[in-house]
Image (cartoon, rainbow, N blue to C red):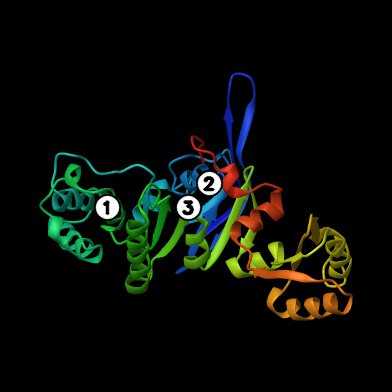
Amino acid sequence: MIHARGLTRRFKTRRESIEAVRGLDLDVEAGQLVAFLGPNGAGKSTSLRMLTSLLPPTSGTATVAGHDVVSDPAGVRARIGYIGQRSGAGENFRLHDELVTQGRCYGLTRAQARRRAGEVLGLLDLEPLAMRKPGTLSGGQRRRLDIALGLVHRPDLLFLDEPSTGLDPQNRANIWGHILRLREEWGTTVLLTTHYLEEADSMAERVVIIDHGRIIADGTAERLKGDLAGDRIMITTREEAGAARAAAIAERIASPGDVAVDGTVVRLRVPQAGAALPGYLRSLEAAGVEVTNAETARPTLDNVFLALTGRSLREADAPGGGG
């Protein structure tokens, strides 16, 4: 569905040439739901624009839905849906008419466009709003309309750039419900960017992380968390001297670089915290270390990014950046 090799995009300024994307290699098979993550300025949106033929690559090749993004951009656009960060709907026409017009732009007959408009209105629970204008919609309703506009020609591949940004938790959950329903009913392949890591963690079958224009991790969320972040154990001792002994004992089950002491608190990273904690506590008891509290924690995708780059993805995502 997507096969990219060495995809690169440079932007020239008055003083220098900047590589926004540096040799992107990416394969997405039919039916997958892939989350494309990275901080502002990492190259996410630039990559999506190249893959959707909206921005020509400086070098490299990409075939999307069986068509080359450089030599056959029209073929790519006819077979994909792209929902950007900003609304694509006008303000002067009713929802149904907007969708029919969109379908006609993709070469559908008027009858086909009307039928498809009815399908996507039903799929996204927009039928009661069909005769309203976009300006009268709430943020969540408007985002559903954007997705409907990207689906009216029934694409095999859908690109979603920040589909739930700016929505409240209820509307975010609603949008995700529709995305999952879309995949279940139509088998659509989905590549999306999101700043909400919990969405990627729980919804996506595969997570791709990009930073400084390069892919730095690719796999299921569980595998990335297990391989690159690991579980956490945190214990609190009654005295600092006990914490020092606890840290030394912790190095039997964790690497020295994965053990940290802060006063009476010891933190360590291990492959499986739930299995490792009982034995660790027995060793501490045998050594006479009094533990007042013990906790385990599963890693997050932000822990993965921290392990890869030395910084938090949330910290790196300061407002005002680009992709």
Quadrant assignment, res 251: bottom right
Q: Amino acid at mark 1?
A: Leu
Q: Nearer the viewer, residue 79 or 187?
A: 187
- Asked whether residue 65 appears in the rendered view, the answer is no
Which of the labelled discs sits on residue 44, or is there none?
Answer: 2
Helix, strand, or loop for circle 3? Answer: loop
**Residue 230: percent from left, percent from top:** 70, 66
**Residue 165: percent from left, percent from top:** 40, 49
Report the mark closest to the observer, 2 or 3. 3
**Residue 158: percent from left, percent from top:** 39, 58
Helix, strand, or loop for circle 1? Answer: helix
Helix, strand, or loop for circle 2? Answer: helix
Q: Is residue 184 above or below residue 309?
A: below
Q: Nearer the viewer, residue 26 or 93?
A: 93
Determine whether label 2 and label 3 are within 8 Å by CB: no
Which of the labelled discs sits on residue 139, or is there none?
Answer: none
**Residue at the (71%, 48%) spot, across then down:** 310
Task: Specify which label sits upstream in the sequence, 1 or 3.
Answer: 1
* Disc 1: CA contacts within 10 A as few (<14), some (14-19) or many (>=20): many
Q: Is residue 203 above or below residue 323?
A: below
Q: Amino acid at mark 2?
A: Lys
Quadrant assignment, res 224: bottom right
Q: Is residue 302 above or below residue 31?
A: above
**Residue 156: percent from left, percent from top:** 38, 63
Q: How many angstroms separate mark 1 from mark 3 (CA)?
A: 20 Å
* Disc 2: CA contacts within 10 A as few (<14), some (14-19) or many (>=20): many
Task: Specify which label sits upstream in the sequence, 2 or 1.
Answer: 2
Which residue in the structure is indicated by mark 3? 194
Q: Is residue 57 above or below residue 265?
A: above
Which residue in the structure is indicated by mark 1? 149
